[in-house]
Amino acid sequence: MRRLGGEVWFGLILLALCSAVAVLAPVLAPYDPRAFSGQPLERPSRAHPLGTNDVGQDILSELIYGARVSLTVALAAGAGTVLLGLLVGGMAGYAGGWLDQALMRLVDGMLSLPRLPLLILFATFLGSGLPQTIAVISFLFWPTTARVVRAQVQSVRQRGYVRMARQFGASHPYVFLRHILPAIGPLIAYGLVTSAGHAVAMEAGLAFLGLGDPLVKSWGLMMRFALNLPGIFLTDRWLWWLLPPALCVTLLILALALIGIGLEQNLNPRLARRWR
Amino acid sequence: MGVGRRAFVYLLTFWVILTLNFLLPRLLPGDPLAALLDPSSSDYVYDPEVRAALAAYYGLDRPLPEQYGRYLLGILTGDLGRSIRLNRPVAELVVGHLPWTLLLVGTALLFSSALALLTGTESAWRRGSWADRGLVSASILLANVPVYFAGMMLLLLFGARLRWLPLAGGRTPFARYPSALAAALDIGRHLILPALTLTLAMLGAKFLLVRNATVNVLGEDFMLVARAKGLPEGRLKWGHALRNALLPFVAHLAAHAGMAVTGAVFIETLFSYPGMGRLIFESVTARDYPVIQGAFLVVSAVVLTANFLADLINLRLDPRLREGGAVG
């Protein structure tokens, strides 16, 4: 490992902070986010540091519990994307031949599909629950990972020690798990972080468009409700209702992106030189 | 891949999209009318006789292959169904909304490309300087900030605080323009904020692309030769470095067009801009399925067409991509 740059540390600290808030939500939140703990649309006060929303729920508590939603999406959709990408890309790169050709044509086709319109269509007809959203995001984003994984597996497969292992009679699953997987480990970490970032952005975006899980108050859904209030920009209500969730989503996406950039530079030292 | 094969791949992709659009609503269990009406919608019909009549009217009682044939035929003749909410043909709604999106996306693509080419080349030329470092950091930030966040900030600053620009809409409601110029000015004023947001959203990724491509070109032998010939600085920078960096830039135009359309959907929702994104948002809110589907088809077609055009430009610019050449 090369030394990590300042921006990576910034990203890691932000991510750790967000995770801590998510884990400690019941301790940190002053109220149950679903409880009607005040009058509707209260201004910030000692009792409600960020005021209350249009039905009288405490905004700060909603914000704290929202971290759980975004991190769940990041983790689940990130893992789903990487697993699918690893499966298809690994198989294509390792097997080669016609299977490789067929799988890569599939990847090309999937990459040319317009993602956001498809996400909207799927969310409309398959329902907009959190599990469905996670599944659809994973399904639409795996091809990018598959392509990188395939290229790397192809190169690792040709290396001396891997061919040697095969010569000594190691089985395919053994070679894949013992030699190929560790060699592409850093790539998987990079894929996980970047797809987690995309997933957070997409989930918040869908909720922003009104296609979020109505039962799970995510940061995106908070923005939606705030924007549904007529004239939110004409008073200073946006300052404590709209801005905090928007800022939280942005910071989480930024944190994941910065960690990704750091990992990418570790993968490809030539890139690091290019940034200097 | 030649032009013919590329065209075939895009047609195939569009066919997949058409079929998904047909199948998804019909995969829902039970109710054939579910393709038209959400059970939670206020327009939902409960009377079984009316439901059967409606299903027959829309041809939903026919066998699937026949429905599929009718659906494809309808699309070919420009029939995208009828909006439940507005009781108007979807095609008519699309014709009313699409020009706004094309205006927004086109303006943003133009400005972000021009700015990225200028600043990217300059930045690569002075790589390592504080200006370059600053621009790179700013671009990484811009490329990763969600577009709705950037839009909100601009809306708050210029629309709500300073009140320099209108908060929402594509033109002044009910305005009667004395001349075409007055109309253009009004539409332009409404365009500034959404277009600025989309330009900024795309600038980050584009700038990084141009800068990296130019840095790579600067290391090439022909740059050394050109310098040794004693060519003036300007010729080197714009005639040699930028010109060769244009290739990867154009190669990514297709991806950027998709990005721009995605951004436009959010921006139009935020600014109530009367384009396709706004249409999608309003139909999602009202669960107006035929409109969502029609808008989905049109937006997909726009993105695929943009990709195809970008491919054609690439083929013209880069002889290595033509027959027999390696792609990639």
Image: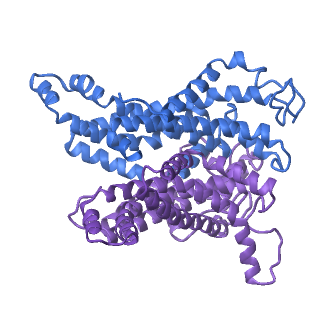
Q: Residue at x 52, y 28 (%)?
A: A12
Q: Residue at x 36, y 60 (%)?
A: B9
**Residue B290 lies in quadrant:** bottom right
Q: Is residue A194 above or below residue B113?
A: above
Residue at the far bottom in the pictured view: B179
Residue A158, by quadrant, is: top left
From the image, which quarter does the C terminus of chain B lie in?
bottom left
Which residue is painted at 47% across and 63% down in the image?
A: B117
Q: Position of residue B291 (x, y in %)?
A: 64, 58
Front in this rendered view, residue A22 or B131? B131
Residue reaching furthest to the right:
A39
Instruction: Tell how many labels.
Output: 0
Q: Nearer the viewer, residue B234 or A26?
A: B234
Chain A, hue in figure: blue
Q: Residue B193: in sight, yes or no?
A: yes
Residue B265 locus on image (x, y percent):
62, 55
Colour for chain B in the figure: purple
Residue that appears at 84% across and 37% down: A54
| Colour convention | by chain
Q: Would you say residue A128 is visible in this rendering?
A: no
Query: In the rendering, at what x and y percent does residue B139 appear?
Result: 52, 50
Q: Position of residue A162 (x, y in %)?
A: 17, 28
Front position in the image: A222 or A254:
A254
Q: Is residue B1 above or below residue A129?
A: below
**Whether residue A151 is situated above or below residue A184 in the rendered picture:** below
Q: Is residue A9 above or below residue B59?
A: above
Q: Residue furthest top?
A: A27
